[in-house]
Amino acid sequence: MHRFGVWAPKAEKMSLKLGERVLLMNGPNRRGWWMLEVAESGCGDDYAFLIDDDPTAYPDPRSLAQPTGVHGPSRLYDHSAFEWHDQLWRGSPKTGAVLYEMHLGTFSKEGTFDGAIPHLDYLADLGITRVELMPIAEFAGARGWGYDGVSLFATHEPYGGPDGLKRFVDACHSKGISVILDVVFNHFGPVGNYTNKFGPYLTEKHRTPWGDAVNLDEGGSDEVRRFFCDNALMWLRDYHCDGLRFDAVHEFIDRSSVHFMEQLSVEVERLGATLGREFYLIAESDLNDPRVVRPREAHGYGMDSQWSDDFHHSLFTLLYTKEPGRGYYDDFGSMADLHKALKHAYVYDGKYSGYRKRKHGRPVEVLSAHHFIHFDQNHDQVGNRALGERLEHLCGLDVAKVAIGVVLTAPYIPMLFMGEEWATSSPFLYFADHEDEEMRVLVAEGRKRDFAAFFGDEVPNPEALETFEKSKLNWDEIGKGKHAEMLAWTKALIKLRRCTVSLNDGDMHHLIVSTDDKRKTLVMQREEVRILVNFGDQLSSFDLLEGEKLCLVSRSDVEVEGNAIELPGMTLAVLMSTTEQVEDREVSDSLR
């Protein structure tokens, strides 16, 4: 027996198409739900809904499986049938996290959940504690980034479907790795979205870059919010995910007295208390508004962390200066910007932004650095380039080593983008697989037009299979030449971070930052650890503190001479003191 239900307040008549049978549903109730219990139905049965007199059968907006794609019938799926092996798992710590952003389709040669599992030992050995999976909800076509999902409760079938995701999560937990899932609640994809035929999931009163906004505060919004909250809880409860990353929360247009993010954080916290687990909620936001990550008790929205674009832009514009007029990058480019991003999280905390032509942001104040996630690369910053070049492709190995060194020694939660740890030769391009020929042409021509001034006809066609295949990681190169050198450097940095208490301290008051605009140098003091960076192109000398020892350096030809160390251009060094030496210096300084 199965009880079918669908929210369809617009409909005057609803029917269930179960196999070849068409059965009239009961309803609507006061909330607009239609129901029908069918005795001879169960896991594996295909079904769809008929709305009024429309002869087209539409998939269930809450479908758990779409085996033939987003336009086909839904399939009943039983979450309780899967055999889990992670009963003792409670998740890895938030504050000591090292994140790893992964696109499932290009991470392995197979491009599936099962294809990724053999590489988990590698990630555990690297020191990764949390994998952040780019969206895996069902979207149109076989391949894509995942941000055009339409059947949000279903798992993308080409990746391996619902059981494939469960096997992947179960395997991650057996290796001590948490799984954070990227979910898209700010829009539906352009192909295969039938939700608005059932009810007001979208509203014309608000607009986003994708069109009509998700309805979070107009008539019917209670059920729309319930739809998305239930989706969030499903991934955590039924798929055992350890957290969620919410895409572009600045496009949640919500004038309600209880903001949608606050509602999400409350419901996730209650689920965690029930299950005895602590979940990790991450927001992507360009608002520079600390309310996003402030606790609800302090009138915030209760997200645990947010991506820190200001840090990325501050760092990237110091490393790569070959393209003027680059939109939001024009707001950055000085050592002072990086200094502020490290010390205060936001560069734009109420000051004027030339790119936005207005003041932007507000100060972070007393929040821990662990509320912010730092990265030198991610899927957006790489994939939104015409040729999908990674940082090493643009600037070389020395720059890539310095960049990841700053990320992994700063107080914030670090995140790597898959493959950057070994300076992979694979680009990460924008790719898609739209079924509609007109859409394929529009996407390809639009991409070429956007970059025509710089790249002409060199812009890869997003719809071509070759573009997707080029983006797959090349695991065969990992132990060779510069790739082996980069991997060894990254592993050493992660090991140092994970075994050094001061490098896991999120108190920004314990961080001392100094920069020199003329020499283009940066010094970060983190109690026993001091990080020296030369971003310039000239040799730069740094005096050593009493008792300091060289721990790590990004170039092999750097040595300590006397009481100083000379760093060539684009070099990072990590120096260590003992706790006693640090305390002695503090006493000596106070007596001067």
Image: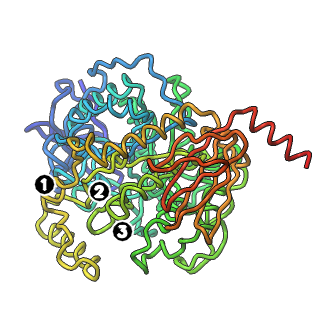
Give the residue number, with chain letter if any, for mark 1: 55
Quick one: 384 or 152, which is closer to the camera?
Answer: 384
Residue 257: x and y in percent read: 62, 54
Name the residue that disc number 3 marks. 211
Check disc 3: other Cα within 10 Å, few if <14, some if 14-19, many if 20+: some
Give the mark nearest the N terminus, 2 or 3: 2
The x, y position of residue 516, in whole percent, is 64, 66
Local crowd at mark 1 within 10 Å, few (<14), some, or many (≥20)?
few
Say which element carries label 2: loop
Residue position marked by numbered label 2 in the rendering? 148
Query: Given the current orientation, which residue lies at the most extreme front position?
Result: 562
Q: Is residue 330 above or below residue 381?
A: below
Question: Vertically, is 67 above or below 53?
Answer: above
Q: Answer yes or no: do the residues labelled 2 and 3 have beta carbons within 8 Å?
A: no
Question: Whole-percent x and y of residue 231?
Answer: 39, 41
Counting from the top left corner in percent of width and height, residue 282 is at 50, 46
Alpha carbon distance from label 2 to label 1: 26 Å
- Of mark 3 and mark 1, the one earlier in the sequence is 1
Q: Nearer the viewer, residue 119 or 249?
A: 119
**157, 145: nearer the viewer:** 145
Residue 535 in view, yes or no? yes
Mark 3, secondary structure of its residue: strand
Q: Residue drawn 57% across and 50% down? A: 372
152 sits left or right of 68 in the view: right
Report the front residue among 67 and 12.
67
